[in-house]
Image: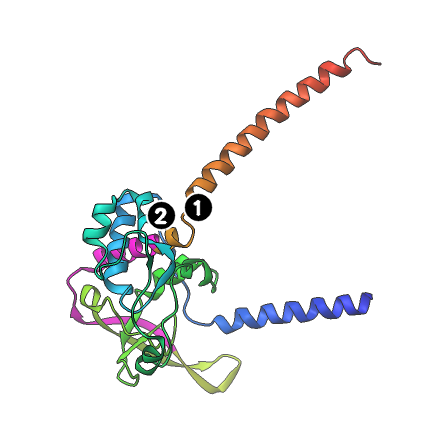
Amino acid sequence: MTKRFLLGLCLALGLLAGAHAAGGGAALDKFPAERVTNLPALQNGARLFVNYCLNCHSANYMRYNRMRDIGLTDEQIKNNLMFAGNKVGDTMHVTLDPAQAKDFFGAAPPDLTVAARSRAGNGGSGADYLYTYMRTFYRDDSTVTGWNNLVFPSVAMPHVLWELQGQQRAVFETEKDPHDPAKTHAVFKSFEPLSAGTLNATEYNEAVADLVAFMQWMAEPHQGQRVRLGVFVLLFLAVFTVIAWRLNAAFWKDIK
């Protein structure tokens, strides 16, 4: 029994290590998490999401009217965030056929409802991953779409926000492998701008932060309520502990 347990533990640890190693990619930048509680940021992120992401990617587990929770009315949602004549109570689905999408891009675009929770690795959260991913696209003529990504090499998705960010190319340098001098590998050094976008670098980073904040909120709309409830419960338990301690002392004070 002990040998079987140890063998199973070793296999589990090996699979975890393999999954971590398979993540690869560049180091992740830190997402400004305070934006998840900023209503104007969430509203701007919702606008960016429906304009740039919802054309190909669905969010089938999120309803439009759920955006009431970020300060929008049904009228605002219908007039500004819905373009296909759907009802406000409908889910955020797309009409793109998955088979056609696979022919176009080589892979069907995944649903993004919980992408901010599922995409994690390289020492960062899913929000860190998305925040870095949307800022590290670069021109690459060797790919089908003409775009590549530092976090997700050889990604099938083109850079949908390129008009906002502009175009850039990645500069790599060839370095020798420290463990095997006979081998070399390309190391990323920097990005060089090719053309300007409608936003400067600071504005683009803020726009991406808003988009990721909305996706983070969408992945768990109850997160803020859960945190507030957790704080209340901890405060209640702290007060109750003091009361219970004093009651215990009062009960046992006359007993020797």
Q: Position of residue 243 (x, y in %)?
A: 63, 21
Outermost residue on the right side: it is: 256
Q: Is residue 59 above or below residue 26?
A: above
- Front residue of 189/90: it is 90
Q: Quadrant of residue 239?
A: top right
Residue plotted at (55% across, 70% down): 19
Q: Position of residue 51 (x, y in %)?
A: 23, 61
Outermost residue on the bottom side: it is: 182
Q: Quadrant of the N terminus?
A: bottom right
Residue plotted at (38% across, 61% down): 60
Residue at numbered disc 2:
36
Q: Amino acid at mark 1?
A: Gln
Check residue 204 for magenta coloring.
yes
Mark sitting earlier along the chain (1/2): 2
Residue plotted at (28% across, 42% down): 71
Q: Amino acid at mark 2?
A: Val
Which numbered marker is on residue 61?
none
Q: Is residue 40 left or right of residue 233?
A: left
Q: Quadrant of residue 249?
A: top right
Residue plotted at (34% across, 64% down): 58
Front of the two marks 1 and 2: 1
Helix, strand or loop at label 2? It is helix
Residues shaded magenta: 187-214
Residue 46 visible in the snapshot = yes
Q: Is residue 233 above or below residue 35?
A: above
Q: Is residue 43 left or right of residue 131?
A: left
Residue at numbered disc 1:
223
Q: Are marks 1 and 2 in contact (CB under 8 Å)?
A: yes
Q: Quadrant of the C terminus?
A: top right
**Distance from label 1 to label 2 (Cα)?**
10 Å
